[in-house]
Amino acid sequence: MSRIYQVKILLLFSLIATFTSQSLVDLADILLVVTAGYIAHQDNEIKKYFKGFSPSGLWPIWAVCILLGLVTNLGFFNTQVWLGFIEYRWVITLLSIIYLIKKNNPFEKLIKICGLFILILNLISIFLYLYRQDEVRAAGIINAVMAFSHNIAPLFSLFTVLAFVSWINFDRNQKILLTLVALTSMMLTLLSYTRGVWISSIAGILICLFVWNYKRALQFLILVILVGSSLVLENKSINDRIFSKTIAETSSNNARLALWRANWRIIQDYPLLGVGHEQNKYHLRKYYDELGYPADTLISHAHNQYLQVWAGTGTLGLICYLVFLFSIFKTAWRGYKNANPENKGLQLGLIAALLCFAIGALTEANFSISKNRFLFLLLAGLAIGFSSSSNKKPGLL
């Protein structure tokens, strides 16, 4: 089996893993890193491996910020320091994905193959939603609503934009496949009853369609308004979810507000380095007491990735995280501008998916959820890797 097919299989397995189990995500992570490391060593390209994506020397600066924040708050010999620091191994995962894609250019028919498997996973998820009679919100095979919704929504954005932009380039079977993947992904996004991904997926699609063709974007916006209004008026569950009419909805909103207020207080008290990566929740009780919240107030992550990073790693850590995101979008945008017309749809679809994730992070700490982070790394790796080959004609479908 050629190396390029091995990389395709590994990328496909990694995508499937994000929708199935954490154990498979961990296995895919290890396989990506080991495979990339082995190839880089065999081809004497270790320096190239580490220089695949290194925005302005960000990685060592970020590492120092994280380590200082953990050591300052927990002490050098506290095991939590090193466990927290090791969590940033995802940087190696991202570099591995980018290296494998740039090295092997595995895009030929990759989207068609991924589309088929995503469609199968979507159909299984819809069946499980209907089969689990007590299931109020779609949770997929992993049976975790937030992790599932923040994975399926970016794919809804990706395939919707891809279908819009590249429709004329597809044959009949390809159009059917893309339509089915986009529709089933949209259905599952809707059935997750997660307001954050409703907003972020539509926002990601609209922004990218406006970049491509503002008339098509306006048509899509009108369609969203008409369909959305009908659903709000006719579907009680969606109406209750949007307007927070139930006790559960009100309680959820209050818990999220409490988390935001407490994390903001943490930022005020620890502005430079934070309280340590992912240590926010251990400080919440103190701030809840100061703010007058009851003893049973939710102890959790910040339900906002930017607050989560800011409170945990301080202003320096937040700046590093924002530079990281900006660098990804800058590289992906450059790839879109330089792409052949046949390839612009995929690159813009990947940008839409990344935008969906970044906007969805305003209401959920999605980068702190392993399955969501792994999918984001896959999408970012594809966007960065594709940027270096999108002026070619790899036969994506």
Image: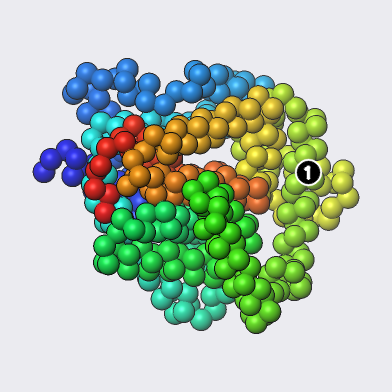
Front residue of this view, candidates 144 and 363: 363
- On the picture, is 276 further left or further right than 179? right
- Residue 184 screen position, x and y as percent: 43, 69
Quadrant including the C terminus: bottom left
Which image quadrant is residue 295 in?
bottom right
Front residue of this view, candidates 243 and 292: 243
Residue 17 seen in this snapshot: no
- Residue 225 screen position, x and y as percent: 63, 68
Residue placed at 75% from the left, 28% from the top?
270
Residue placed at 43% from the left, 73% from the top?
126
Which image quadrant is residue 136 in?
bottom right
Label 1 SS: helix
Quadrant including the N terminus: top left
224 vs 297: above or below: below
Which image quadrant is residue 234 in?
bottom right
- Residue 105 screen position, x and y as percent: 25, 37
Residue placed at 27% from the left, 67% from the top?
172
Total labels drawn: 1
**Pointer 1 residue:** 262
